[in-house]
Image: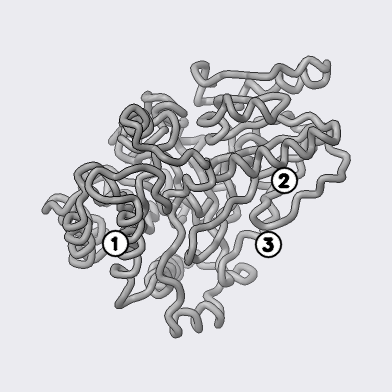
Amino acid sequence: MKIKLIYPRWNKLEGQTTFNLPPHGPAVFAAALPDDIEVEFIDENLEEVNFSDDADLIGISMMLTTQVKRGWEIADRFRSMGKKVIFGGISTMLHAEETMAHADSVFLGEAEGRIEQVLKDFNNNELKPLYNYMNDRPPIEIVGPARRSIYNRDFYYHKGVQMVDLVHASRGCKFNCYPCAVAYLGGREFRPRPIDKAVEEIALADNKRFFLVDNSLAQDKKWLMDLFKELIPLKVSWCSHTIMDDPDVLDLAAQAGSWYVYQAVFDTSDYIKERIKRYHDYGIGVEGTILLGLDDHTEDYIKRLIDFLLEIDLDLAEFTVLAPFPHTKAWDDLRKQKRIFSTDWDDYNAGKVVYQPKHMTPEHLQELYFYAWDTFYKDENQSLKMYKLLRSVTEREYSLGTYRHRRRDLVNRSFSKKIVRGGDTKENSASNRV
């Protein structure tokens, strides 16, 4: 049996530097399939979809809300040709009802231990329109390594540098942040993988730079410290979301290869200033993630915030505007208040204003979003800052004797020229990178 697994393209933000990471969801789904299933993977951001092929089943994996309309288009075309189409992934879960109109089947939840029944039903011509396992999650112990063999590795380079692989060591999140859908998607329970399983996946990966995509590394101190101790001998380099603000944890994280973190900067407090300094004290870079457009944000507040960011020595900053994704508190509140004026899902890219802000017009918030990017990167552009982060990890790898001259894995002349002539100022947001 052959499955064609498609990751739909989406339109990148205006003015952004475009690069693509190997998407995690499709590789995790492919790992849950029986070994005898042939998988052809298409990342439509990097190659065209061939609509004339011999696949038995078409799978469409969608992570971003900005992918859903394109995913529906692909499904409609395949179904018009008589092909069966099944959807899965994060944005499928957020847009399940709409997606069912374009699908033969929709799969909600985590695939491990569940997909065999779907395939059995397909082979018996009894495919169900909906498989909902969102409240019936598999034991975390059965989660195995992602099936990265489905990637065409040649695609995942940027300016000669191999992009990081994505790995998760846990699922779920005990926090429930205002703009975030993780509580709905993965539950409020923190579910760590057995450390030996997570470490084995990292150790076996050819790529020794990776993105630890856990929702938060601030949920269980003992588990974190045990994980980091096991990573130290591997001499890997990794970036992640927030790490627990604890000196013992940060020290071990640095020893284990923490390269840089995505840290939310939500105010101009001394705590945030010291938080950034503590990361730097342990040699960990910081990309500040800054959400604009909350109800306490006035124009003066946003401009003060940007001035503050320039003072606290961030390595990078990533600005977004509030996107009220379905199944978030932000969606519930703004919808109840009748402040959402667009549900064109192509606009839900964290760079376009789709709701009425409290203290300004949508157009003015959009202007402040661009002002934030331009002001922060006025004196030192994004490409130069990115280069400095890359240089820091390369220097560390040289010191450990782990740097390898992988094919094209060098900062080549074109990248250097781009830095000299200024490069881009508005980089794509995290939601547009993967």
| Relative depth, front residue between 434 and 228 | 434
Q: Which residue is mark 2?
A: 41
Identify the secondary structure beneath mark 3. Answer: helix
Amino acid identity at mark 3: Asp
Query: Who comes first in sequence, dot 1 or dot 2?
Result: 2
How far, Cα to Cα, is label 1 from label 2? 38 Å
Task: Report x, y in % for residue 149.
Answer: 69, 47
**Picture disc at residue 283:** 1
Q: Residues within 10 Å of mark 1 (few under 14, many from 20)?
A: some
Identify the secondary structure beneath mark 2. Answer: strand
Query: Who comes first in sequence, dot 2 or dot 3?
Result: 2
Q: Which residue is mark 3?
A: 154
Query: Who comes first in sequence, dot 3 or dot 1?
Result: 3
Identify the secondary structure beneath mark 1. Answer: loop
Q: Residues within 10 Å of mark 3 (few under 14, many from 20)?
A: few
Q: Residue at x 30, y 77 (%)?
A: 379
Q: Residue at x 30, y 53 (%)?
A: 290
Q: Is residue 184 visible?
A: yes
Task: Report x, y in % for residue 137.
Answer: 51, 20
Where the N terminus falls, by quadrant?
top right
Amino acid identity at mark 2: Phe
The picture quadrant where one finds residue 69 is top right
How many numbered discs sit on the rendered protein? 3
Between marks 1 and 2 in the image, the one whose residue lies nearer the viewer = 2
Amino acid identity at mark 1: Gly
Between marks 2 and 3 in the image, the one whose residue lies nearer the viewer = 2
Task: Report x, y in % for residue 176.
Answer: 32, 31
From the viewer's perspective, is residue 109 above or below residue 378? above
| Contact (Cβ within 8 Å) of mark 1 with mark 2 | no
